[in-house]
Amino acid sequence: MPSETLTPAETPAAPPEAVDAALARIRESLDERGWVDDPKELEPWLVDSRGLYHGKCLGMARPKSTEEVAAVMQAAYAGGVPIVPQGGNTGRVAGATPDGSGRMLLINLARMNKVRSIDPANDTMTVEAGCILKTLQETADKEDRLFPLSLGAEGTCQIGGNLSSNAGGINVLRYGNARDLVLGLEVVLPDGRVWNGMTALRKNNTGYDLKHLFMGSEGTLGIITAAVLKLFPKPKTRATALVALSDLDAALTLLADAKAAGAGALTSFELMPGFALDWAERLVDGARRPFEETYDWTVLLEFAGEAAVEDAMQNLLEGAFEAEQVIDAVIAQSEDQRGQLWFLREAIVDAQNREGAQIKHDVSVPVSAVPRFIREAADAVEAALPGTRPYPFGHVGDGNIHYNLSQPKDMDADAFRAKAPALHRAVHDVVARLDGSISAEHGVGRVKRGELARYKDPIELDIMRGLKRSLDPKGLMNPGALLPDVDR
Ligand code: FAD
């Protein structure tokens, strides 16, 4: 399927001589590995991770230090050159993809990948923005600590990208989103000034908590260059089970019981439709569903903590069988079996990608409204395009459902994709009715700006635009991402 060129953002074009002067200054401030403009080398960085959108750029800066990022930003600011910050380029909303104008400069943080220090007594590590998430998990592990942020792209995404998009993942239930794991930040502002907010304090009531402005701002306010991250005790053991629910509503009662039984040890509670396990087994090498039967709904849940979590899981499931919340269950008996269950959870994503065209939504509603959302969204989608196959799964413990849709069986894939606006409207209207969010963890990027304009409170949008103007008066930071164009 060909990808779509992103429409150029409405950023005033700077005079060509100012751009040339800025580019010359930028190249001077970087070493020989710090600048890429060869079209072949640039190619992978100009396409989003879903392969749906592509753009063009003036070139890609690859700074290796905060000072180099600051020098690049100063020169770009002086020359009026728009910037697109980029981490691992795994984001799902094309926030790190330049538009089609060819006037933007990519700044990729991959070379800023040092762990600056670890303070086990303070349970913190200080890291640069380009560190790969998995490397940080391993670094914490070597210190007998846990860095709990965990998501499917962890082998490629960077902590700077995770913080800029306030990533979620599979451990939010217990540890919070990416923003909850941060004590301090270092940010290069659009004009090249460096804000050193690298505090390692757990209590600091001295005014506005500026770090939270930059986290979740998707590169529209500045470039995150480093962070002080929180570490946690490493769980001694885990208990992991896949259960088949008696019905969808049982997800909520089981979740409440699991929270109580685990006494704070519940880390994950992932809903999957039974047929998604069948698709995974059929379409993804190595995926094995542990049940003979295809149940309507299943949940993968995990406790992490001390040895007692195994007993807690056993007791929880015995109670759940008695209360008829659960009709089948397997408990992982080894690390290998645990790995297989989690592989199945990841495989359902690949499986859907292989079963025809898809239209995706990453939404949240209050946890208590999840079953109602799934039912009402199914009705809305069927009314909008009969035969569409809903494929809802995700982090039910956080009220976050990936409400994906697969094409009707006999429909042409492009004809189905052309229905995306109507299907987005059908799903997002249900979300809005239930006081939910049209983006739970993936952000807004260049893909959901129109939807943000429709569903976000106008006063909130005005405040966001005011903050943007005060930090980025020339509008050079990631234009076309996150904030809708239209001024109300
Ligand atoms: P990029 O994609 O490079 O950038 C993301 C945004 O941040 C862009 O707007 C970019 O401009 C900006 N940005 C990047 N670095 C910086 C920086 N240093 N300073 C300022 N702005 C910056 N997300 C979840 O939340 N939960 C999941 O469970 C999850 N699972 C995923 C599974 C797969 C297989 C994939 C491919 C993605 C998944 N994601 C998930 C998407 C998720 O948003 C990204 O994986 C990750 O958080 C983005 O990090 P990145 O380094 O790739 O950032």
Image (cartoon, rainbow, N blue to C red):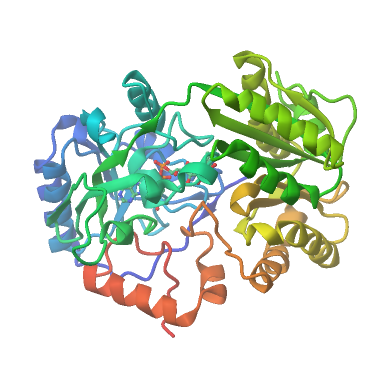
Note whether 340 is above or below 401 in the view shown: above
Residue 286 pos. (x, y %)? 70, 18
Nearer to the camera, 127 or 93:
127
Nearer to the camera, 297 or 225:
297
Residue 454: tell me if it is visible: yes
Specify the farthest residue to the bottom: 488
Q: What residue appears at the point 45 percent right and 48 percent down from the top-left corner? A: 177
Within the displayed image, which quadrant is ligand 1 positioned in?
A: top left
Nearer to the camera, 47 or 364:
364
Q: How many marks?
A: 0
Residue 397 pos. (x, y %)? 62, 48
Q: Is residue 95 left or right of residue 436?
A: left
Q: What residue appears at the point 30 percent right and 35 percent down from the top-left corner? A: 110
Q: What residue appears at the point 32 percent right and 69 percent down from the top-left corner? A: 11
Q: Is residue 468 left or right of residue 92?
A: left
Note whether 341 is above or below 404 in the view shown: above
Residue 181 pos. (x, y %)? 37, 44
Placement of the N terminus among the 4 image quadrants: top right
| Location of residue 51 by image quarter | top right
Q: Is residue 171 left or right of residue 260?
A: left
Q: What residue appears at the point 14 percent right and 47 percent down from the top-left corner? A: 26
Residue 396 pos. (x, y %)? 65, 48
Residue 56: tell me if it is visible: no
Nearer to the camera, 423 or 317:
317
Note whether 243 is above or below 398 in the view shown: above
| Location of residue 481 by image quarter | bottom left
Placement of the C terminus among the 4 image quadrants: bottom left
| Location of residue 10 by image quarter | bottom left
